[in-house]
């Protein structure tokens, strides 16, 4: 249950303490069986006696469970004086079973396709088997965490009375898929990538740098650069910001882990729960569901979020306008953090629905 | 004066008849002298006896003078029953002096940096020396053609009574520069690019394909893909559209020519005419100036265009909303063509100002 410590960027030294839930031979939706699969998770606070205070908070693309720490703690938006917070690691995210830590024949470039549903099914086992919890207090997340939030809410409606999806959609927009194609092309363009069979992730530095360039474009808005909003963060120029923040952020990661997450992101879609209809699938979500697009988000535009919110039986739309665009989730601007926190608190204390 | 016929994609067989103006040893703003420099141009209609009906229409990134043919002709928006239309080729565009047609030591990867001002100064010589014209009727263009339009209007205010800048700005937005960095990284990522010293442009097919991917992302809006607006164009899927239209468009081009144009695009800025102040430079433009952003343009957003228009003494703002975004210039939607044509006609027949 404690699992083995990970190496490098994905080590406990880098990511703080994590626990591991043994999924055994985990059968993915793609039909492959991951032997000895592990689901990493990080917890905050205490599960109460009634087991009704669990808040599930999955992370975004390229993140880890500790990416979310700033929002969680005593007196924080997700208040650990009240809630027991479980932050699961994505399959492929580097902490849970991933290309970077799985032995052959599923190592590196031959790690199988994983879907958002696989993540949610693994998390379901953690919540029910490990913690013995039958109903969550809430689930929330941003970007790919939002995709997982939608999947939870439609797949297990009786378990999800409240939810918040920040900067994410129930179905990945086509324009966003074009972006994913692009940034994957950039990552894989490095000859050192070698179809995923590099011996050291650091050798793929050119691919990781190119990949970062795509995010420094689409992760932010025109206004972010026009208004030089990076200034408050201690950078001397836009290039300084891009080099230190964006390239520095992605540089230590494992390319195959990013590929696994990107493929999952590309395919995000709850429509199968509605027999192929996105509207029908959204209509099955009973949760009190807070849809929180970030204004100017190039990945998950306000328009798509508004449209999806309109099909949720208990949907609440809260648009957060910010020059940071999609990357508002990094908490780069105090005003963004405040508004995000406000919606978290509102959602967590809102009446929940499961019928 | 007739020049030599170009090869391949840049040949008269592909691009129609062009003429060539001999610039001699043309000193670029970067200090390099291009020996035997040639400015390609394509004309439509007839210069009248008063020599006051010349409309200058420079082209966009990756275009050629014939890219503009659809808007020019008898009864067309730029009506050749009235106007004599001159479409100059960009330096580096493949028809004029460019990496693909210049002998050593300025061939291929060692072609010098060219600026928007260099293009305008070359065009000035064509207009004054070759045609003996002292005042244009108007200048117009989109994207990099709009950048050249701004440069003309601020550099030669007495010569430009009317102008229209479609989907372009007087100063390139920083976010747009990030895009240019990205698509250049993609083009150059192909090992066959060989720092610009490939022997055959077709060998750089991987770079050209990756470059096209960047344009299939940023050239269009979310709504273009969300609403499947490519359907009316005879494609079976979004990927079909991207493969046939976007990749097909860029595939035959010369990578070094694209690099030369991209560097010029990146540096587009009329601020030097205002002592470093964009506002002061715009304030020097006396032309009746039509600023025509395309709604949803990811390169030159409406906000930047609105801001610039506000500093023009005789500025007119005409926003054209379209799901095609920046690529509305390709005339993919009849409604766009109609609105673009409307502004062209309005501008050409408007009162002109030079004081």
Image (cartoon, coloured by chain):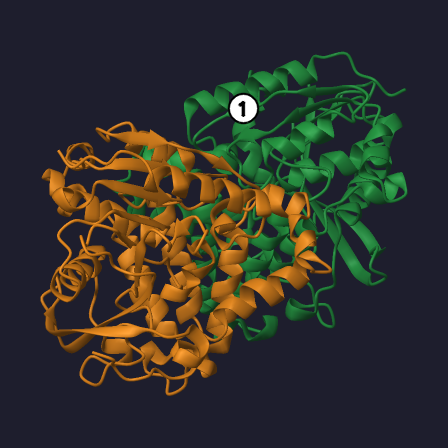
Chain colours: A orange, B green
**Horizontal placement of B126 versus A244: left or right?**
right
- Which is more toward the observer, B16 or B304? B304
Residue at horizontal 37 percent and vertical 48 percent from the top? A176
Residue B200 in view of the camera: no
Q: Specify the subunit that label 1 lies on.
A: B
| Quarter of the rendering containing residue A237 | bottom right
Residue at horizontal 28 percent and vertical 42 percent from the top? A163
Residue at horizontal 39 percent and vertical 80 percent from the top? A11
Residue that protrudes farthest toward the bottom in the picture: A199
User: How far from the left and from the top, in percent, is residue A178?
Assistant: 37, 50
Return the residue at label 1: B320
Q: Is residue B355 above or below residue A166?
A: above
Residue at horizontal 41 percent and vertical 86 percent from the top? A200
User: How far from the left and from the top, in percent, is residue B26?
Assistant: 83, 55
Residue that protrudes farthest toward the front in the picture: A49
Q: Quadrant of the C terminus of chain A?
A: top left
Q: Quadrant of the N terminus of chain A?
A: bottom left
**Horizontal placement of B167 versus B111: left or right?**
left
- Which is more toward the observer, B91 or B113? B113
| Quarter of the rendering containing residue B254 | bottom right
User: How far from the left and from the top, in percent, is residue B194?
Assistant: 56, 75
- Which is more toward the observer, A56 or A10? A56
Residue A21 in view of the camera: yes
> Tag count in the figure?
1
User: How far from the left and from the top, in percent, is residue A15?
Assistant: 42, 73
Circle 1: element type? strand
Q: Is residue B174 above or below residue B340?
A: below
Crowdedness of circle 1 by 10 Å Cα count: few (<14), some, many (20+)?
many
């Amino acid at each position: 249950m404690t699992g083995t410590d990970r190496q490098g960027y994905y080590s406990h030294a880098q990511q703080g303490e994590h626990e591991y839930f043994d999924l055994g031979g985990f059968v993915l939706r793609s039909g492959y069986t991951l032997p000895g699969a592990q689901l990493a998770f990080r917890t905050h606070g205490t599960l109460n006696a009634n087991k009704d205070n669990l808040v599930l908070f999955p992370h975004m693309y390229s993140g880890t469970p500790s990416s979310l720490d700033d929002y969680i703690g005593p007196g924080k938006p997700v208040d650990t004086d009240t809630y027991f917070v479980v932050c699961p690691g994505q399959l492929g995210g580097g902490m849970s079973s991933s290309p970077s830590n799985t032995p052959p024949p599923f190592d590196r470039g031959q790690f199988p396709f994983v879907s958002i549903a696989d993540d949610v099914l693994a998390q379901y086992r953690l919540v029910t088997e490990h913690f013995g919890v039958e109903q969550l207090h809430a689930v929330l997340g941003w970007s790919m965490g939002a995709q997982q939030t939608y999947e939870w809410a439609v797949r297990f409606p009786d378990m999800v009375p409240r939810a918040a999806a920040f900067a994410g959609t129930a179905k990945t927009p086509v324009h966003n898929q074009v972006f994913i194609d692009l940034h994957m092309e950039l990552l894989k363009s490095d000859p050192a990538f070698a179809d995923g069979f590099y011996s050291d992730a650091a050798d793929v530095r050119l691919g990781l740098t190119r990949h970062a360039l795509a995010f420094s474009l689409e992760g932010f808005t025109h206004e972010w650069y026009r208004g030089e909003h990076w200034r408050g963060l201690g950078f001397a120029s836009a290039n300084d910001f891009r080099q230190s923040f964006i390239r520095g952020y992605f540089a230590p990661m494992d390319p195959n882990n990013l590929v696994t997450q990107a493929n999952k992101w590309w395919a995000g879609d709850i429509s199968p729960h509605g027999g192929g209809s996105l509207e029908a699938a959204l209509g099955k979500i009973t949760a009190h569901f807070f849809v929180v697009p970030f204004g100017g988000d190039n990945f998950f535009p306000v328009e798509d979020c508004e449209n999806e919110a309109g099909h949720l039986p208990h949907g609440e739309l809260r648009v957060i306008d910010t020059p940071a665009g999609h990357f508002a989730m990094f908490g780069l601007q105090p005003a963004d953090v405040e508004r995000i926190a406000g919606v978290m608190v509102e959602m967590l204390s809102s009446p929940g629905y499961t019928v």
